[in-house]
Amino acid sequence: MKKLLYFLLFMVHFSSFTQIVNTGVTDNFDSVQVGKLSIGGLIDTYYGYDFNEPNGSLRPYCVSSARHNEININLAYIDLKYKNQYVRGHLVPGFGTYINDNYVSEKGSLKNLIEANVGVKLSKKKEIWVDAGILSSPYTNESAISKDHLMYTRSFAPEFVPYYLAGVKLSVPFNQKWSAYLYLLNGWQRIQDNNNPLSVGTQIEYRPNKNILLNWDTYIGDETSLELPEYKTRYFTDFYLIWKRKKWSMTSCVYFGRQDFKDSLGTKSQLFWGQANVIADYKVSSRVSISARAEYFSDPSSVQIKPITAVSGFSSYSSSLGFNLKISDNALFRVENRFFFSPQNVYINKSNSNVKTSNLLITNLTLWF
């Protein structure tokens, strides 16, 4: 623990002063300004080959870039943003296999909205805002927009927390280093609420200098539903770091969740899950970089991940190695190899046997404007 603290303090002291962006949220959109309206967009295409050759071409345990042996669109969106002195609005309709897989519980046209919110400024002198609608999620160090991240594929971490939220958000910047956010929400990645109580989330950002960001989030909410009547209050917290210095970039996230559970006999219990990951990137040149990831996800009671095989609970390691080529200022080509290993037989190979490993080779071309 002391070595970790010394390492973090070393990075804080010696980091250069280049502004860092919180890539853990999805509202970091590129756009062109036309008066008070900003317009932008993105197309994220991919081809992935899972060497376990899953039946039905859907790779298990993921919602991003989830198709096997297909050339497809992970995410495409148009970004419309309006802002004047006291009012702002943000509309981001989206399409692709990520939308199909991640918004499956939403109904009608709501499943095609990445963001749709309106905000009002509460102070003449400070940037204190209240925004309401479909909001970007602060949870974990990764969002759905692949171009903002060091690796093309998403870690287990963001795939099993909310990518989006619906509710009200209060933003309060205290100074250049500290900002706080309070959320009143319909639930855990829910646009339409499935029970009466609202949920609460918090976010605190700390920027000790322009090259490092520390972020802490929490969530508390009642997860009772018709599908899961045994689920009661859910508690969740995550902590992540984003750091850059010269040719090196790094991000790391740790989180833990607790789900209160009450069975049909009235017996109460507590179910836990958690994960840890670290991702690093080294710039070989102005346009080429090499990236790597290591992670571990543990969900022994299958609160978030239900195995596709007949085993109890889910746990898995993952390691990745990626090549990234910036074709132009708004185009990115990537190749990544990702290897999964579990202590349990949670994967299925092409012979339909339960196995402990899986391997993915995936390539991607993304354009944004």
Image (cartoon, helix red, strand yellow):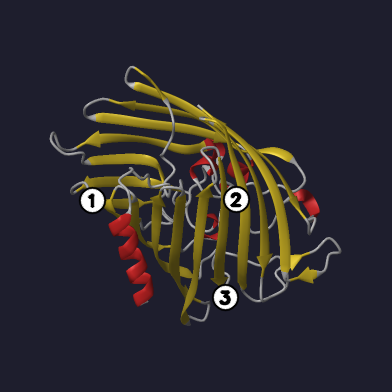
Say which of 201 and 179 sits in front.
Answer: 179
Amino acid carrying mark 3 in the image: Pro
Q: Secondary structure at mark 3?
A: loop
Residue 30 in view:
yes
Indicate the position of residue 136 as horizontal and vertical percent values: 41, 44
Say which of 264 and 84 sits in front.
Answer: 84
The tag earlier along the polypeptide, 1 or 3, is 1
Amino acid carrying mark 1 in the image: Lys
Callouts 1 and 3 close, C-beta under 8 Å: no
Q: CA distance from mark 1 to mark 3?
A: 38 Å
Q: Which residue is mark 3?
A: 300
Indicate the position of residue 259 as horizontal and vertical percent values: 46, 70
Amino acid carrying mark 2 in the image: Thr
Q: CA distance from mark 2 to mark 1?
A: 30 Å
For image coordinates 26% across by 41% down, the residue present is: 130
The tag earlier along the polypeptide, 3 or 2, is 2
Indicate the position of residue 301 as horizontal and vertical percent values: 56, 74
Q: Which mark is residue 177?
A: 1
Which callout, 3 or 2, points to the residue nearer the camera?
2
Indicate the position of residue 246 as horizontal and vertical percent values: 41, 47
Q: Which mark is residue 153?
A: 2
Quarter placement of the N terminus: bottom left
Q: Residue 146 vs residue 248: left or right?
A: right
300 vs 45: above or below: below
Say which of 4 and 23 sits in front.
Answer: 4
